[in-house]
Image: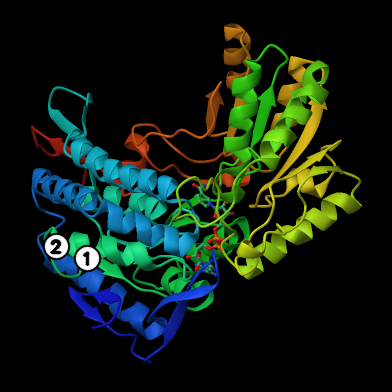
């Protein structure tokens, strides 16, 4: 029995490929899993196509699909501790974070179970002798591709609405973090999904991801990951399609602190914003903008708190942040740290690997703060995706907004102030998909998530997150058919 799940069977990669899964805390081997190739992808897409056409899944009363989602929700909660521990082994994140992730994954299933069937479309007012209505139907076969930072969470934001809408899918997690996704698919099987509705392939982006996004029988590609991969997926969707795409890409997210903000809360949340999960968060507040009059005091307190962050094994109590996800990723982040120095940013703290010998085998980096940054620097404009924050100064509200919007991304941003009207004004003007006021990072399944600009195309979560997996159909009925008489002959 292998770890690919195709047409209701657990199966091995046709060519026998295997891949090591490594714990980033100490580089130890966690397990090995099947590594698919284009042949397996083809089998999985065919299975999803067959199920879409032949199983009664898409035509089930919505309530029945919603019941399945609720069963998955319950099973996720039944197994939450196991899943959370596996996510920590796979990603290095703390167990506390992984437990929250699993709750959020379960909530996504419950939310879409509750939303499904609530919207029967709409009747369009045309004329008394016409019945015109718009209904929403599943798109078909969905290719779902997820990243490694929130492996199960990002997958669930796709899987739950795709199933609720009546689609079938082939899911590919990141090759570095496949384990909890395998667990989720087992739960979907246990919950009673018909064969071929949910399919799982594992493997590299270049081989398996590319084969999936190029497959002619895929109707929709929903992808979460980096900007360059998003571009490649968009190009493939154009070449092989056009077909529907949804892209959740990166961010370089501003966190604006006005001088009248609650000081302790703003410093505290600026840590969460930038250093949670070692900054490997698409919405990380890695671009801190501080009002000039507060700047020096703020940076000093911020650096002191950053130095106190306890790095270590995410499995242990009291550990506040884990390692980066891989040796290669750490090297990339170190490259950015070197670049920041070269560009003239002032290193306030961090910038190196920790010297604690207990952490020497893992892919750790110290929380790093650069001050005296300006918007022309690449370290300010590019997504580093590590524990690295840049600090810029601003003097006026207009300048804060202008800086915060000076990014090619537009995923999320925060604003800290005790003046309510200013908070709303700034939130209104920010060109970002999510804006937090006196907070950072919360998201809820009821509210849309996604980016302006290069941060993506489409939205996940909320009612729009279901619409991504639906086609609108207009059904127009003439209630009094008679010859139109247009052609006279
Ligand atoms: P990545 O783009 O390298 O990989 C993401 C997924 O795409 C993986 O499963 C990978 O195997 C696959 N992939 C890689 N090349 C591919 C190709 N040519 N064709 C098809 N699939 C391919 O991203 P990552 O390093 O895993 O994740 C980090 C990135 O994800 C960051 O940029 C982060 O901001 C972004 N992200 C965004 C969100 C969001 O909600 N907007 C959430 C999490 C992560």
Q: Which mark is residue 190?
A: 2
Is label 2 in a helix, a strand or a loop? helix
Q: How many labels does the image show?
A: 2
Q: In this view, does 8 lie above or below 454?
A: below
Mark 1 vs mark 2, CA separation in Å: 6 Å
Q: Could you say which quadrant of the image residue 412 lies in?
A: top right
Q: Is residue 387 above or below residue 431?
A: below
Is label 1 in a helix, a strand or a loop? helix
Work out whether residue 296 or residue 7 is closer to the camera in this orientation and state it: 296
Q: Could you say which quadrant of the image residue 408 lies in?
A: top right
Q: Would you say residue 102 is visible in this rendering?
A: yes
The answer to whether the residue labelled 1 contacts the one labelled 2, judged by CB atoms less than 8 Å apart, is: yes
Q: Which mark is residue 115?
A: none
The residue labelled by disc 1 is 186
Instruction: Identify the residue at image location x=21%, y=34%.
Output: 121
Residue 61 vs residue 30: left or right?
Answer: left
Relative image position of residue 6 (x, y in whole percent): 24, 75
Work out whether residue 449 or residue 173 is closer to the camera in this orientation and state it: 173
Residue 375 vs residue 96: left or right?
Answer: right
> Circle 2: is it few (<14), some (14-19), or many (20+) Cα within 10 Å?
few
Instruction: Identify the residue at image location x=16%, y=38%.
Output: 117
> Circle 1: is it few (<14), some (14-19), or many (20+) Cα within 10 Å?
some
Q: Would you say residue 220 is visible in this rendering?
A: no
The residue furthest front is: 357
Relative image position of residue 339 (x, y in whole percent): 84, 55
Does label 2 point to a residue whose CB lies under 8 Å from ligand 1? no
Q: Could you say which quadrant of the image residue 301 lies in?
A: top right
């Amino acid at each position: 029995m292998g770890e690919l799940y195709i047409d209701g069977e657990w199966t091995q990669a046709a060519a026998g490929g295997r891949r090591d899964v490594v714990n980033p805390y100490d580089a130890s081997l966690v397990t090995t899993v099947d590594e698919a190739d284009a042949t397996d992808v083809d089998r999985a897409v065919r299975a999803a196509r067959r199920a879409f056409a032949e199983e009664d899944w898409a035509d089930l009363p919505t309530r029945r699909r919603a019941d399945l989602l609720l069963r998955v929700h319950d099973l996720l909660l039944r197994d939450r501790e196991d899943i959370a521990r596996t996510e920590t082994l796979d990603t290095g994140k703390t167990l506390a974070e992984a437990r929250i992730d699993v709750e959020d994954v379960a909530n996504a299933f419950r939310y879409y179970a509750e939303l499904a069937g609530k919207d029967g479309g709409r009747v369009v007012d045309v004329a008394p002798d016409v019945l015109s209505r718009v209904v929403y139907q599943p798109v078909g076969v969905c290719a779902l591709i997820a990243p490694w930072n929130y492996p199960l969470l990002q997958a669930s934001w796709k899987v739950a609405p795709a199933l609720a809408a009546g689609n079938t899918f082939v899911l590919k997690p990141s090759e570095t973090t496949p384990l909890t996704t395998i667990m989720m698919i087992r739960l979907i099987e246990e919950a009673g999904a018909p064969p071929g509705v949910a399919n799982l392939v594992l493997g590299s982006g270049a081989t398996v991801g590319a084969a999936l996004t190029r497959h002619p029988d895929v109707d929709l590609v929903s992808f979460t990951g980096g900007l360059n991969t998003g571009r490649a997926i968009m190009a493939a969707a154009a070449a092989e399609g056009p077909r529907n795409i949804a892209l959740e890409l990166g961010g370089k997210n501003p966190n604006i602190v006005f001088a009248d903000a609650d000081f302790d809360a703003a410093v505290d949340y600026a840590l969460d914003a930038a250093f949670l999960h070692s900054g490997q968060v698409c919405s990380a507040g890695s671009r801190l903008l501080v009002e000039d009059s507060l700047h020096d005091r703020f940076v000093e307190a911020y650096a002191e708190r950053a130095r106190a962050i306890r790095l270590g094994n995410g499995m242990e109590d009291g550990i506040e942040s884990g390692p980066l996800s891989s040796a290669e990723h750490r090297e990339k982040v170190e490259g950015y740290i070197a670049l920041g120095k070269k560009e003239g940013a002032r290193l306030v703290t961090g910038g190196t690997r920790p010297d604690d010998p207990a952490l020497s085998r893992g892919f750790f980096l110290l929380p790093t703060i650069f001050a005296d940054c300006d918007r022309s620097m690449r370290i300010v404009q590019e997504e580093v995706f590590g524990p690295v924050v840049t600090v810029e100064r601003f003097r006026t509200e207009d300048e804060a907004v202008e800086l915060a919007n000076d990014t090619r991304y537009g995923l999320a941003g925060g604003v800290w102030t005790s003046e309510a009207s200013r908070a709303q004004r700034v939130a209104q003007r920010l060109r970002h998909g999510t804006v937090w006021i006196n907070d950072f990072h919360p998201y809820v399944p009821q509210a849309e998530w996604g980016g302006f600009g290069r941060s993506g195309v489409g939205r996940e979560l909320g009612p729009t997150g279901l619409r991504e997996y639906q086609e609108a159909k207009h059904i127009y009925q003439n209630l009094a058919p008679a010859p139109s008489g247009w052609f006279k002959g």
